[in-house]
Amino acid sequence: MNKLCGAQGEIVNFPFKDVHDIFYNQNGIEIEIKEGNLYVGVDDEAKLDEAKELAHLHLFAWSLRQNIKVGVDFNHTWKTNAQGNQDNFLDLHDNVRVVDHLQIQTVTHQVSIKGSALIVTQEMHDSASPANDTSMVNKALKDKTLKNALRYFSEEVVDDDRPLYGIYKALEVIAHHLGGGRDGWRQLGVLAGQNEVFVTDVKQTTQLQRHAVTPAHRRLTDDECKERAKILIHAYANSLP
């Protein structure tokens, strides 16, 4: 990476260590994935925070597509000095915690993430680069509603023990944008080519984690809610120019 300054960090829970790709290189910002690490570089130091945010957004979209929760802490930064050499800095914070590394199993395409086995298909491996999420990211950069939905789903739904509230938040932000109330949820179903029951079953089920006392009933399993949420988020994204 030939940039004046930048930052890097390990992608936590990323199972495809062999992926190497410069998947973004525009407007003086470059983002690269290599050996399980994420690198952002900029020509102008003032753009570094923007570059980090863009990298996080790519991971949000990647998590939605691959259904694997990932994250990155950019704790290593560098800057080119007056002599043309790189000065490197490692940021250590009190809240930084040790994270277990991935354990690659002997079984083909099986990895262990946070102690739970995950079967990784050949299709998932072949599409492992965040470059495959460019279209989704470009839309999210122009649409705050989609950006928030991706963040909620990535941070609070994928690989979460109690995903229902995160599912509600991800869909509610879209429904609110589409008009709010029952009509907003109905419109979200229309975008996906589904009837109102398809959406209300998700909404009913997610009420179980939103309120201590609720008249809602479980209509779907957590996994069914996740899959319907992904369908609805993609439908909203596809409706954007």
Image (spheres, grey):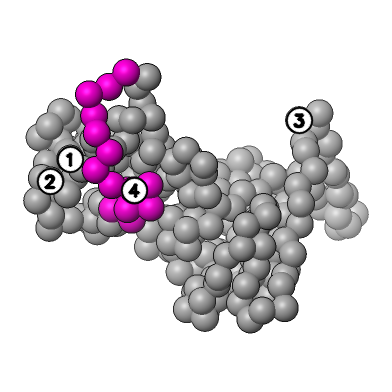
Vertical comparison of 73 with 62: above or below: above
The spot of residue 98 in percent (x, y) is 80, 43
Q: The residue tagged with tag 2: helix, strand or loop?
A: helix
The residue segment tinted magenta is: 213-230
Three-letter residue code for mark 2 = Val
Q: CA distance from mark 3 to mark 2?
A: 44 Å
Mark 3 / mark 2, whichever is N-terminal:
3
195 shown above or below 204: below
Name the residue that disc number 2 marks. Answer: 197
The front one of 116 and 64 is 116
In the image, is 76 to the left or to the right of 112? right
The label nearer to you, 3 versus 2, is 2
> What label does residue 95 carry, if any?
3
Residue drawn at (78%, 38%) of the image:
97
Q: Residue at x 86, y 55 (%)?
A: 86
In this picture, residue 236 sits left or right of residue 193? right
The residue type indicated by label 4 comes to Thr
The quadrant in which residue 109 appears is bottom right
Disc 1 marks a residue whose amino acid type is: Thr
Is residue 223 shown in magenta? yes
Q: Are marks 3 and 2 in contact (CB under 8 Å)?
A: no
Tag 1–tag 4 contact (CB < 8 Å): no
